[in-house]
Image: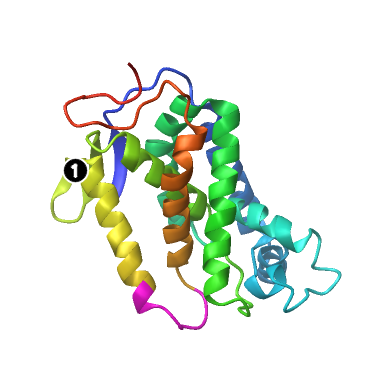
């Protein structure tokens, strides 16, 4: 299922959300323009490799262009395929604008980065000796989803679903189902080797967003309370 839109209005232009989307697209266009060998080296340079992050391994000097800890940030702007990029950017666009709106631009940047780093650590801790680079914005975006669930569970999300086509579904159902699927898939993939979807990054990012939203939202923004249709005003 892919989210296409929601019925949750914003008061301010989501300039940070748009900037993140543009940056991810530009990086992927550059990444896609590289021949196979340089393209693979680019992923190893800027992807988050658990064994390198935790000091169990080192990249060759010509590849290690940024400190290992910094790759937890740079990896957020890399993607493995067009479908990986499009899926992440759709989720970021649909849900990110409202979270930016209730935080303000500067807090949203910090929230996004912190959730992304915690998500990368959550994935890395499942196999600290892994040499497979992790790339993608989904860990940071998962933090946004967790925050959105607490603030706007009754907002309606327009989904594109197989067979059904497009339909509106409450955000609480969409995001709750999404998180359950990450838990199930994460549990089924414990101990698996090689690349794939970093389910524990999604889980860690989602939990980080739930925990941190209270610190990053503006003081006047309320959490959802049954009986109130909107949760961002008095």
The vertical placement of 185 against 7, above or below, is: below
The answer to which of 176 and 162 lies nearer the viewer is 176
Residue at position x 21%, y 24% in the image: 228
Q: Is residue 67 left or right of residue 11?
A: right
Image location (x, y in percent) of residue 165: 17, 47
Q: Is residue 37 magenta?
A: no
Q: Callout 1 environment at 10 Å: few (<14), some (14 to 19), or many (20+)? A: some
Instruction: Considering the whole magenta stretch, tell me its main secondary structure.
Output: loop
Q: Position of residue 113 (x, y in %)?
A: 59, 45
Task: Report the residue at 43% width, 33% height from top.
Answer: 99
Quadrant of the image occupied by residue 183: bottom left
- Residue in the image at 74% along x and 73% along y: 55
Q: Residue 79, position in %: x, y?
A: 55, 57
Q: Quadrant of residue 48?
A: bottom right
Depicted 200 relative to depicted 84: above or below: below
**Residues in magenta?**
187-195
- Does residue 11 lie above or below 6 as drawn? above
Please name the residue shown 57% across and 65% down the image.
Answer: 134
Q: Which residue is mark 1?
A: 166
Looking at the rendered structure, the secondary structure element under dot 1 is strand
- The C terminus is located in which quarter? top left
Which residue occupies the extreme right position in the image? 61
Depth check: give the residue in front, 120 or 93: 120
Above or below for 25 versus 106: below
Q: Nearer the viewer, residue 223 or 24?
A: 223
């Amino acid at each position: 299922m892919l989210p296409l839109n929601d019925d949750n209005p914003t008061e301010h232009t989501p300039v940070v959300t748009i900037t993140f989307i543009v940056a991810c697209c530009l990086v992927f266009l550059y990444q896609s323009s590289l021949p196979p060998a340089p393209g693979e080296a680019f992923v190893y340079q800027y992807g988050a490799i658990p064994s390198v992050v935790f000091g169990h391994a080192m990249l060759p000097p010509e590849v290690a262009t940024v400190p290992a800890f910094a790759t937890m940030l740079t990896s957020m702007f890399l993607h493995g395929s067009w479908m990986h990029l499009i899926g992440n950017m759709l989720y970021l666009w649909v849900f990110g604008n409202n979270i930016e709106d209730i935080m303000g631009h500067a807090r949203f940047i910090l929230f996004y980065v912190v959730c992304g780093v915690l998500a990368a650590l959550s994935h890395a801790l499942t196999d600290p000796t892994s040499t497979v680079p992790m790339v993608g914005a989904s860990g940071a975006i998962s933090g946004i989803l967790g925050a959105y669930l607490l603030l706007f569970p009754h907002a309606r999300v327009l989904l594109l679903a197989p067979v059904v086509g497009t339909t509106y579904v409450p955000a609480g159902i969409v995001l709750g189902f999404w998180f359950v699927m990450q838990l199930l898939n994460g549990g089924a993939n414990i101990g698996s080797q090689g690349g794939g979807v970093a389910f524990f990054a999604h889980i860690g990012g989602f939990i980080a967003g739930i925990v941190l939203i209270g610190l990053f939202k503006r003081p006047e923004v309320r959490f959802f309370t049954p009986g109130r249709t909107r949760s961002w005003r008095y």
